[in-house]
Image (tube, rainbow, N blue to C red):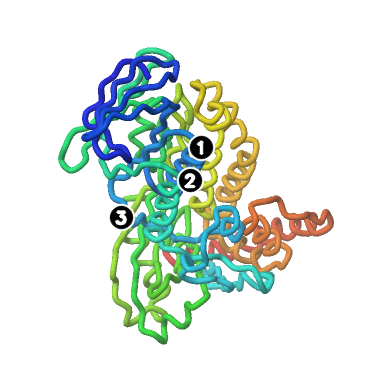
C-alpha cells in the first residue's frame, strides 16, 4: 500500500491501526490492543454492497486469497424482488433447499383480453422455478462469504477518494456506529444497486431505470393453497405500459406487483390494476409489506474504470422481458471476483484496468451480451402494445416455445434448436401478430386507450 494511516480500521483482529509504506507487498507490522503481529501484505479489495452480486464477489475474492471487505448498510433489509431463481443456480451456487419457499411447477400468463395460457406444461418432473425471499438468500450468501474469510462491515459508504497514481489506493469513507472511518484498498467491486455510489464516483454514466412496486399479501389458507406451486404473469396497458404484473408465491404469502419505465409516476395506479385483476384470488388477504425499488433497464456505458468494476444492478445486469436479475447478479459478482484472483495471482500482484477488462468484462460480454440484446428486442416487439401482448400470450401456448423458453431460463444455456420448428415458430409469430392486431385494438378501444 502507499503511505496511508487508517483510523479506525475494521478487521477480524478487532480494532487496529495499520500504516502502509509501499506497494511492493513487503511484510508489515500491525499493532493490536495487546500484541504486535507481523503479517504479509496482500492485495486488498472492498466490495460495496452485500446482495447476491456483492456476496458472490466477496466469496470468490476471499477464497482466492485476497484480503476482502464487504460493506453493507442494512444486512437485514429486504430488496423488493419477485424472488425467482433458475434451477441451475441451485447447483452452481450451492443453494440449500431449505432456502426455497416454493417450487413453482405451474405458470399462467394472462393477456389483456384475459386469454390464459398454462406456461408450465413442458416442465419435466424434476424441473421447477425456485421462489426465495431476498432477505433470506442475501443473508445466506453474505454469511458464506464471511466463512470464506471476507470481513463484513455494517456501514454506510459516504465517499470514495480516487487514487493519485496507478498504484496508490482508493480511500473509502464510511459511517459505522455513528463514527466516521476510512479504509484504503487496491480494488473496488461496486455491487451497490441501481443507484450505485461507486458508479457515480467513477463517472460510469447514467442508464434508464424502471421502478418495481410490490405488496406482500398474507392470504387465507384456502387462497394460499391455490398459489402453492403457481406463479402468474399479467400483461396489459392497465397493469403496465411496458412490463408485466405478477403474483409470485412465498413461504406464507404472495408477492403482488408490477413495474414500468416510461410511466413511473403512475406506478400506484398500475398496482391498483394488478390487484383488481387478481381480486377474487386475494380477497381476505392482508398487506404485510409494501416495497418499491429502481431496476436498471440496460448495462451502464462504463462498467470498468481504473481498478473499479461494477457488477449486478450497479452494472445494469437485469434482463428485459422477464426482469430477471438475481442469477446475473450472483454470476457477474463471481466472474469479477475470480477474474481479480486470476489477474493478481491470488493477491500477490497489483492489477489494472486492462486486467479487469480482460478477465471480467470481456468474458461477461462474450457469454451474455447476445442474451441481453435478444431479450431487449423481444420486449420492444411484444410489450409495446396490447396487440403485441396478445400475440405473446398466444405464442406462449405453443409447446416448442415453452420448451425453448424453459431450457434457456432454467439452465442458462442455448436450448437445442429444431430448424423445422424454428421456421414454424417464425410463421406462428407473424400470424399471431396479425391476428392480435385486431384483438389488441378491440381491447384498447374497450378500455378507452
Task: Please identify the quarter of the rendering in which residue 249 is found.
Answer: bottom left
Whether label 3 touches label 2, CB < 8 Å: no
**Mark 3 — residue?**
77
Name the N-terminal-most of marks 3 and 2.
2
Residue 159 visible in rendering:
no
Q: Which mark is residue 56?
A: 2
Question: For the C terminus, which image quadrant?
Answer: bottom left
**Mark 1 — residue?**
337
Mark 3 is surrounded, within 10 Å at the Cα level, by few (under 14), some (14 to 19) or many (20 or more) other residues, namely few
Dot 1 falls on a residue whose secondary structure is helix
Name the N-terminal-most of marks 2 and 1.
2
Name the residue rendered at 47%, 53% in the picture: 242
- Point out residue 395 in the picture as x, y percentages from the top left corner: 66, 63
Mark 1 is surrounded, within 10 Å at the Cα level, by few (under 14), some (14 to 19) or many (20 or more) other residues, namely many
| Residue 403 versus residue 227 in the image, above or below | above
Name the N-terminal-most of marks 3 and 1.
3
Amino acid at each position: 500500500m502507499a503511505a496511508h494511516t487508517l483510523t479506525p480500521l475494521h478487521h477480524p483482529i478487532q480494532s487496529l491501526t495499520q500504516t502502509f509504506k509501499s506497494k511492493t507487498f513487503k511484510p508489515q507490522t500491525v499493532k493490536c490492543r495487546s500484541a504486535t503481529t507481523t503479517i504479509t501484505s496482500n492485495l486488498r479489495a472492498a466490495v460495496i454492497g452485500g446482495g447476491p452480486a456483492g456476496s458472490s464477489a466477496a466469496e470468490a475474492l476471499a477464497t482466492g486469497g485476497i484480503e476482502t471487505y464487504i460493506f453493507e448498510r442494512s444486512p437485514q433489509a429486504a430488496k423488493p424482488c419477485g424472488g425467482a431463481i433458475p434451477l441451475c443456480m441451485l447447483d452452481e451456487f450451492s443453494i440449500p433447499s431449505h432456502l426455497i419457499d416454493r417450487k413453482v411447477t405451474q405458470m399462467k400468463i394472462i393477456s389483456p383480453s384475459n386469454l390464459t395460457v398454462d406456461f408450465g406444461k413442458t416442465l419435466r418432473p424434476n424441473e421447477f422455478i425456485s421462489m426465495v425471499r431476498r432477505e433470506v438468500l442475501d443473508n445466506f450468501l453474505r454469511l458464506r462469504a464471511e466463512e470464506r474469510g471476507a470481513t463484513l462491515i455494517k456501514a454506510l459508504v459516504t465517499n470514495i477518494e480516487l487514487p493519485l497514481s496507478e498504484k496508490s489506493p482508493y480511500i473509502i469513507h464510511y459511517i459505522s456506529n455513528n463514527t466516521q472511518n476510512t479504509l484504503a484498498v487496491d480494488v473496488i467491486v461496486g455491487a451497490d444497486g441501481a443507484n450505485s455510489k461507486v458508479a457515480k464516483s467513477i463517472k460510469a454514466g447514467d442508464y434508464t431505470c424502471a421502478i418495481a412496486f410490490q405488496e406482500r399479501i398474507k392470504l387465507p389458507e384456502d387462497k394460499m393453497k391455490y398459489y402453492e406451486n403457481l406463479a402468474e404473469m399479467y400483461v396489459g396497458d392497465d397493469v403496465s405500459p411496458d412490463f408485466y404484473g405478477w403474483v409470485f408465491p412465498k413461504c406464507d404469502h404472495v408477492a403482488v406487483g408490477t413495474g414500468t419505465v416510461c410511466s413511473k409516476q403512475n406506478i400506484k395506479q398500475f398496482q391498483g390494476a394488478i390487484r383488481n385483476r387478481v381480486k377474487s384470488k386475494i380477497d381476505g388477504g392482508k398487506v404485510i409489506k409494501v416495497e418499491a425499488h429502481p431496476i436498471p433497464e440496460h448495462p451502464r456505458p462504463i462498467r470498468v474504470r481504473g481498478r473499479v468494476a461494477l457488477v449486478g444492478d450497479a452494472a445494469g445486469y437485469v434482463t428485459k422481458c422477464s426482469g430477471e436479475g438475481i442469477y446475473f447478479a450472483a454470476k457477474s459478482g463471481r466472474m469479477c471476483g475470480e477474474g481479480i484472483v486470476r489477474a493478481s495471482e491470488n493477491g500477490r500482484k497489483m492489477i489494472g484496468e486492462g486486467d479487469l477488462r480482460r478477465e471480467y468484462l470481456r468474458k461477461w460480454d462474450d457469454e451474455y451480451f447476445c442474451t441481453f440484446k435478444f431479450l431487449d428486442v423481444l420486449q420492444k416487439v411484444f410489450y409495446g402494445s396490447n396487440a403485441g401482448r396478445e400475440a405473446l400470450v398466444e405464442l406462449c401456448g405453443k409447446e416448442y416455445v415453452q420448451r425453448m423458453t424453459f431450457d434457456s431460463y432454467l439452465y442458462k444455456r442455448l436450448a437445442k434448436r429444431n430448424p423445422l420448428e424454428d421456421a414454424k415458430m417464425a410463421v406462428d409469430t407473424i400470424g399471431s401478430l396479425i391476428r392480435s392486431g385486431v384483438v389488441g385494438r378491440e381491447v384498447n378501444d374497450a378500455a378507452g386507450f
